[in-house]
Image (tube, helix red, strand yellow):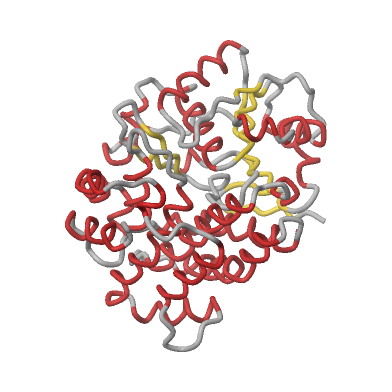
């Protein structure tokens, strides 16, 4: 049984949702779509499986060079591929990287370059118009929620990881079939799941006033904290997989309200040249120290977080996430992930300038960001 949801965009959710793919493209008027994905998804057979199940030709053009963290260079490469094949729409199949890359292609297919002028920290959100390429997002992970999010995170030619935010970047349709996450490896299930949790927590703690988003975020947190260990321990547990996919979706539906310092830092570190850092895993490591930093400014909200997670009254929320990370096998420190002390000053500067910093519940300065990273460096 599938459910159709209209909230920010059209969402077709449930096991078997992929079978409606050709009909969704038909409604959008796309007859020659480009598939944007990555090599891992291709090698796992998910592209061919999805096209077959969705009633689409097996010979659609496929761009499979999405890097682990999408880059401006990859956007330009995929855009050339899109134009070469005279495409009129995009199917983004994969994790947040493929979907974010597809958003960048959809943007530049109809807007003048360079991409940088549309970055939110440069006032670019107002330059993004509704004239976008039809985009169907099909997540194969349960983490970023990019399939319903208004943001795209792209690492620029100069190494900066920048956010592009606009309601016009939200995909035209999200097809969310938990079956596509069944083969997701254990550590990717854990890392992407912690990304979904970080979205729910940071959105809820954001000081901006948006009660519906807060309610959605708490529901997502309850689902994810209760289901992630089961999804990690048994990838074939489709109930847990479905709960995690819904939690990821809810995290992104809610983070229209803004994120916070966890994402400020993970965006900064994720753009560092020479380091391949998984975004969700970074969020997992950074969440406990950021919670300790923020707690004095949002103590009352911690009460409801404890409730959503099933913790005892007065329980240490940051410590609970430390324990969850340990149970999932997440790295304990940034050093384990390959982060060196020498990059902290630059990362603190970039984090301070990041668009997520404005919605952190406690005002944070460069020195605060550096101290938070030092706390979990080694």
Image point 37% across, 45% down: which residue? Answer: 338
Image point 43% across, 32% down: which residue? Answer: 129
Q: Position of residue 362 (x, y in %)?
A: 26, 67
Q: Position of residue 171 (x, y in %)?
A: 57, 39
Image point 41% across, 78% down: which residue? Answer: 302
- Closer to us: 204 or 305: 305
Q: State left or right for residue 301 relative to residue 178.
A: left
Q: State left or right for residue 146 relative to residue 5.
A: left
- Closer to us: 121 or 28: 121
Position of the N terminus, as image quadrant, is: bottom right
Q: Position of residue 158 (x, y in %)?
A: 29, 28
Q: Position of residue 363 (x, y in %)?
A: 22, 63
Position of the C terminus, as image quadrant, is: bottom left
Q: Is residue 156 above or below residue 237?
A: above
Q: State left or right for residue 136 relative to residue 325.
A: right
Q: Is residue 182 above or below residue 211?
A: above
């Amino acid at each position: 049984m599938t459910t159709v949801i209209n909230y920010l965009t059209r969402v077709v959710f449930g096991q078997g949702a992929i079978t409606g793919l050709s009909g969704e493209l038909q409604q959008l008027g796309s007859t020659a779509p480009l598939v944007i994905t990555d090599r891992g998804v291709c090698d796992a057979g998910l592209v061919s499986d999805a096209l077959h199940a969705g009633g689409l030709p097996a010979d659609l053009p496929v761009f499979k060079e999405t890097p682990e963290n999408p880059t401006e260079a990859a956007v330009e490469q995929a855009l050339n591929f899109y134009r070469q094949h005279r495409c009129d729409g995009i199917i983004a199949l994969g994790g947040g990287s493929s979907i974010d890359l597809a958003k960048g292609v959809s943007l530049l297919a109809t807007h003048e370059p360079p991409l940088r002028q549309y970055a939110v920290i440069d006032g670019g959100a107002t330059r993004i118009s509704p004239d976008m390429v039809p985009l169907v997002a099909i997540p194969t992970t349960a983490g970023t929620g990019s399939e319903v999010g208004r943001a795209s995170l792209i690492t620029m030619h100069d190494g900066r990881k920048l956010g592009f935010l606009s309601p016009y970047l939200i995909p035209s349709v999200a097809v969310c079939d938990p079956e596509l996450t069944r083969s997701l490896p254990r550590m990717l299930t854990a890392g992407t799941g912690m990304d979904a949790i970080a979205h729910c927590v940071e959105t809820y703690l954001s000081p901006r006033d948006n009660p519906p988003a807060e309610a959605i975020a708490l529901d997502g947190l309850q689902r994810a904290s209760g289901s992630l260990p089961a999804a990690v321990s048994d990838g074939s547990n489709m109930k847990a997989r479905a709960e995690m996919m819904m939690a990821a979706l809810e995290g992104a539906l809610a983070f229209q309200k803004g994120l916070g310092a966890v994402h400020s830092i993970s965006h900064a570190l994720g753009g560092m040249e020479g380091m391949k850092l998984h975004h969700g895993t970074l969020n997992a490591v950074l969440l406990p120290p950021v919670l300790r930093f923020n707690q004095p400014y949002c103590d009352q909200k911690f009460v409801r977080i404890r409730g959503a997670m099933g913790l005892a009254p007065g329980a240490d929320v940051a410590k609970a996430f430390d324990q969850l990370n340990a149970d999932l096998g997440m790295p304990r420190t940034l050093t384990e992930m390959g982060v060196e002390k020498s990059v902290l000053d630059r990362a603190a500067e970039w984090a301070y300038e990041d668009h997520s910093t404005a919605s952190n519940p406690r005002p944070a300065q460069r020195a605060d960001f550096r101290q938070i990273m030092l706390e979990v460096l080694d």
